[in-house]
């Protein structure tokens, strides 16, 4: 009679096995999730590191400051709607991931407040070309 041992779930299993079939399936499923998470997290951390290097660079600070001076550090969308509100950040009209050649181009930068920035990113999902054209027009118009 072959030797048996108890799996952590309480079932009897052959001595040379580490766990029963059900526990093994559950174990594999959990490990796949952990692997996928680590794989995603590694990619995310790599992108985050690249962003930190970019947004901390001297060239970015110069381009950002030029855009702030041009826009008088006001949110351009609020100003277009007859409201004066201080800009919280400088936004890339064409996304950095898609247009690496325009990352320091001040014509691709616009000053926005937090609220308008969130709205712009929400609109990018449905009406990207329309909102990008509006932002480009605001930059070209100037004050």
Image (spheres, helix red, strand yellow):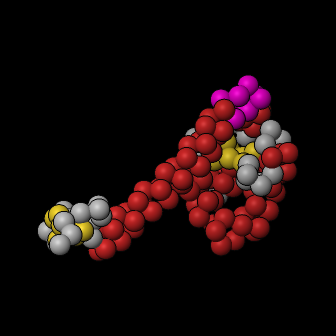
Closest to the observer: 28 or 135?
A: 28
Which of the 4 image quadrants contains residue 53?
top right
In the rendered image, residue 120, in percent from the top left (x then y), is placed at 63, 59
Specify the segment rendered in magenta: 54-62
**Would residue 86 appear left or right of 71 to someone viewing this image?**
left
- From this view, report whether residue 134 is shown above or below residue 88: below
Q: Residue at x 42, y 56 (%)?
A: 34
Pick out the residue farthest to the top.
58
Predominant secondary structure in magenta? helix
In the rendered image, residue 140, in percent from the top left (x then y), is placed at 85, 50
Q: Is residue 60 magenta?
A: yes
Q: Residue at x 21, y 69 (%)?
A: 2
In the rendered image, residue 6, in percent from the top left (x then y), is placed at 16, 65
Q: Is residue 45 magenta?
A: no
Closest to the observer: 57 or 71?
A: 57
Closest to the observer: 125 or 17?
A: 17
Location of the N terminus by quadrant is bottom left
Q: Residue at x 61, y 42 (%)?
A: 46
Location of the C terminus by quadrant is top right
């Amino acid at each position: 009679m072959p030797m048996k041992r108890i799996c952590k779930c309480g079932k009897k299993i052959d001595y040379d096995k580490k766990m029963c079939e059900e526990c093994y399936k559950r174990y594999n499923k959990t490990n796949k999730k952990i692997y996928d998470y680590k794989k995603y997290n590694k990619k995310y951390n790599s992108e985050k590191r690249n962003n930190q290097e970019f947004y901390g660079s001297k060239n970015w600070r110069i381009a950002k400051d030029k855009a702030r001076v041009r826009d008088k550090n006001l949110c351009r969308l609020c100003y277009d709607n007859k409201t004066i509100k201080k800009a919280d950040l400088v936004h890339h009209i064409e996304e950095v991931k898609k247009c690496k050649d325009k990352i320091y181009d001040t014509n691709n930068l616009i000053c926005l407040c937090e609220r308008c920035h969130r709205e712009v990113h929400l609109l990018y999902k449905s009406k990207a070309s329309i909102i990008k054209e509006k932002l480009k027009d605001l930059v070209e118009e100037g004050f």
